[in-house]
Image (cartoon, helix red, strand yellow):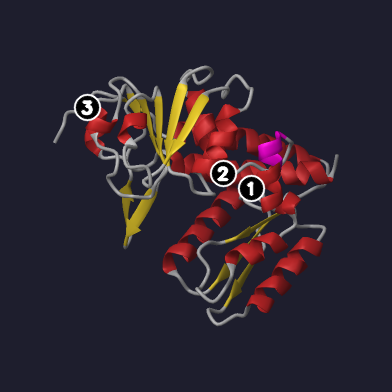
Amino acid sequence: MSTTTAVLLPGAPVAEQILADVADRVAALRARGVVPSLATILVGDDDASAGYIRIKQRQAAELGFASPHEHLPADATQEDLHAVIDRFNADPDVHGLLIQYPTPRHIDYDTALQRVDPDMDVDGMHPLNLGRLAAGMPGPLPCTPAGIEALLAHYEIPVSGREVVILGRGATLGRPLAMLLSQKRPTANAAVTVVHTGVADWPRYTQRADILIAAAGVPGIIQPEHVKPGAVVIGGGVRYSGRRLLPDVDESCAAVAGAITPRVGGVGPTTVAMLFRNAVTAAERRFT
């Protein structure tokens, strides 16, 4: 095993800073008689998904959110799910809405997502919100990309004018992150290249990156030979084998990188924090 030389970039301190701001904003709303509310929907009985819902509910309670929840059985129909979404959309006491992914195979998640009021979409993945991102308009941001920008800013890693390479073009991470980091903003404004496993010589791109972000969802795809010495490496893509997390970035890359996210506890905490930032912003928008 290689000796770690890179500076570690854990997500927990970043998330704590974001959530402290969220807690202050929640307190200000509650002082005005407004209880911010993040509703969740779970379809089926997947243990991991149920666990994620419990984590979000605990975090909601700590921050002062109400957290109404609807648990539909595994044999619920698309229409059943839509009825719950419609009910939450119409409830004036609900400000944010999350459909836990994945849903059972017979449920069309994308169709259900499009049913969500875009201003209540705390994941930032509604097509209208992705369009807002592309146009540089205000709206809920996709949580993992926004968390990565926040992580880079927290550790004072220069982004503006630098070469960022994203390995992965998925709708939840690679594509929106490219749009986010190319926007004219002090914590962005980068030269961004998106490459993917369909490009035979993709290492040619990653080897020149000042900041390399793995978003392919292919365990261990990034090895030390794919990293420019001294580069910043952010592991965003993961898969699971049971409950074991399998990241895109092999841990041996720490011997080459200048800074790197840890195998566990990198962008995960910042993703959850951004979800609650979207939720409190949705509540504030309703009352301004």
Q: Mark 3 sits on what residue?
A: 255
Q: Which residues are magenta?
A: 132-136
The amino acid at mark 3 is Ala
Residue appearing at x 53%, y 61% in the figure: 101
Question: Mark 1 and 3 residues: CB-CB less than 8 Å, in contact?
Answer: no
Q: Looking at the image, is 78 positioned above or below residue 86?
A: below
Whether residue 66 sits left or right of residue 73 in the image: it is: right
| Kind of residue at disc 1 | Gly
Residue hosting label 2: 143
The crowd level at tag 1 (other Cα within 10 Å; few <14, some 14-19, many 20+) is: many
Cα separation between marks 1 and 2: 7 Å
Indicate which disc, 1 or 2, sits on the residue closer to the N terminus: 1
Q: Is residue 75 left or right of residue 231?
A: right
Q: Earlier in the sequence, mark 3 or mark 2?
A: 2
Instruction: Give the residue furthest to the bottom.
Output: 75
> Can residue 273 be seen?
no
Q: Is residue 230 left or right of residue 61?
A: left
| Residue receiving disc 1 | 124
- Where's residue 112, x and y in %? 65, 66
Q: Amino acid at mark 2?
A: Cys
Q: Which part of the image, by quadrant, shows the N terminus?
A: top left
Q: Is residue 53 above or below residue 141?
A: below
